Image (cartoon, rainbow, N blue to C red):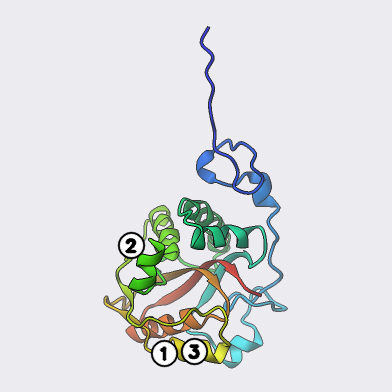
Amino acid sequence: MVLRITIRGLCWLCQQPLHFSRHGICSFCVRNLPPPPPCCPRCGLPSASQTFDCGRCLNKPPPWDTMIYTTDYLPPLSGLVMRLKFSRQPELAVTLARLLLLRWLTRFRAGDVVRPDVVLSVPLHRRRYFSRGYNQSELLAQPLARWLGSQFRPQALRRIRSTPPQQHLSEAARKLNLRNAFLCTENFQGKHVALIDDVVTTGSTLREISKILRNQGVVSLQIWCICRTL
């Protein structure tokens, strides 16, 4: 009699064995992730309606069409994002990307969004890239593009100016900090584009990049992120 022992992966959150190790997080933990409150479909901030743009967006529309995210920047996912970003655990990217895919599929099946032709990631300056060893947004975007059959263009966006970290800056200082910091080396005119980041706080980074893409004449622009600070 041969005894076979199958070692499956463990859930990143509850540390219980996974039936499908490639999922990274068990179905119980996925079902119990804190749901975001009713939010504006465009800016992703709390709003009375999940169908129509909020007053903020009607008064001053952001340069993108919709924002899709998994949860607020709260535990447990905020901890996983921090581990991906600062603890050299790039293997977390596929797990987090899958959660984002599930959220996008919900919006897609409701007819709220279209499948993107092109998937882009928010770039890091080369100094920070070499220091960290990878771009976490790029690691999130790559499997998403593959699963959706979209083009992934990791070199299309470049950060041409090194800037101080955004975390401790005010919203006004963030805007000044990012002025003329990005360059797009390809033309996506007439394309449906999804732009991927790990966390959105004020949206200053995404706003700067989105303006460049809008000036090119993209048909639609979706923002996807794991966490949205509410």
Q: Which residue is mark 2?
A: 151
Look at mark 3 in the image and give the residue it sits on. 175
Name the residue at 59% across, 47% down: 12
Task: Identify the amino acid type marked 2.
Answer: Gln
Image location (x, y in percent) of residue 228: 60, 71
Quadrant location of the C terminus in the rendered image = bottom right
Tell which tag, 2 or 3, sits nearer the viewer: 3
Disc 3 residue type?
Answer: Lys
x and y percent of residue 97 in the render?
50, 56
Residue found 44% across the figure and 65% down from its top: 137
Q: Secondary structure at mark 1?
A: loop
Is 101 situated left or right of 219 in this image?
right
From where the camera sits, is residue 115 visible?
A: no
Query: Is label 2 in a helix, a strand or a loop?
Result: strand
Q: Provide the residue designation for mark 1.
A: 179
- Under circle 3, the secondary element is helix
